[in-house]
Amino acid sequence: MFKLPAAALLGLLMTAAPLAQAGGAGGPVPASGVCRPGYVRPDFVALNRQLRQARTLWQAQGLKTYRYDVRQVAAPVLFPTTRVTVRGGQVTGTALAPGESGEPSPLARLTLEGRFDTVAQILREQARARCPDVRVSYDPALGFPVLLYSGLGDGGIADGFGEWTVTNFTPLQ
């Protein structure tokens, strides 16, 4: 992974933002139509059920004011970990997480509800892919998504996969 200067990053984002925001999933479909050896197709019925259950748990919390950190990869770019602040259900700010350098990721400006929307979008898109590779994890107590990985199980490398992780969730007053 490498980090890009801000100007180069902005140019990349203008063309790749929809795929990167969604966590990738735009990589090429393998020409041979063959998935990598040992490939197991994700269970999209189970993944969508888990999404609904997690979203219901999250909505039951009623949390509209909080802060979290997000680390995002839109291969081959590793964005610096970005701290997202949400007040009244709206993103009010982003900043670099402590110890990070560079510019905050412009792809980070999502509420946790927005992250649920991203997961739903990826599940819809990947269900149509030839060799989808999707992993999603949710916070067991509060329900919000803590990991989304999206790529292809065709044995290809690097380009076309995306991932984000949410850490340091903190409710605010």
Image: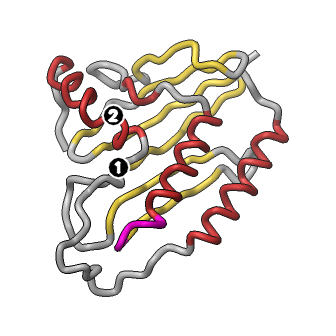
Most common SS among magenta residues: loop
What is the three-letter code of the residue carrying label 2? Ala
The numbered mark at residue 24 is 1
The residue where tag 2 is placed is 17
Question: The C terminus appears in which quarter of the rendering?
Answer: top right
Residue at (38, 23) in percent of width and height: 106
Viewer-side residue, 98 vs 165: 165
Specify the farthest residue to the bottom. Answer: 38
* Picture quadrant of residue 85: top right
Find out whether residue 129 is within the magenta segment: yes
Residue at (71, 54) in percent of width and height: 140
Residue at (40, 20) in percent of width and height: 96
41 shown above or below 15: below
Where's residue 170, x and y in %? 66, 29
159 shown above or below 129: above
Residue at (35, 43) in percent of width and height: 19
Viewer-side residue, 3 vs 107: 107
Where's residue 119, x and y in %? 54, 50
The numbered mark at residue 81 is none
Residue 147 vs residue 89: left or right?
A: left
136 shown above or below 156: above
Alpha-carbon neighbours of circle 2 within 10 Å: few (<14), some, or many (≥20)? some
Looking at the image, tell me whether mark 2 or mark 1 is earlier in sequence order.
2
Residue 127 vs residue 169: left or right?
A: left
Where's residue 149, x and y in %? 43, 55
The kind of secondary structure element at disc 2 is: helix
Residue 37 vs residue 166: left or right?
A: left
Q: Which residues are magenta?
A: 127-131
What is the three-letter code of the residue carrying label 1? Gly
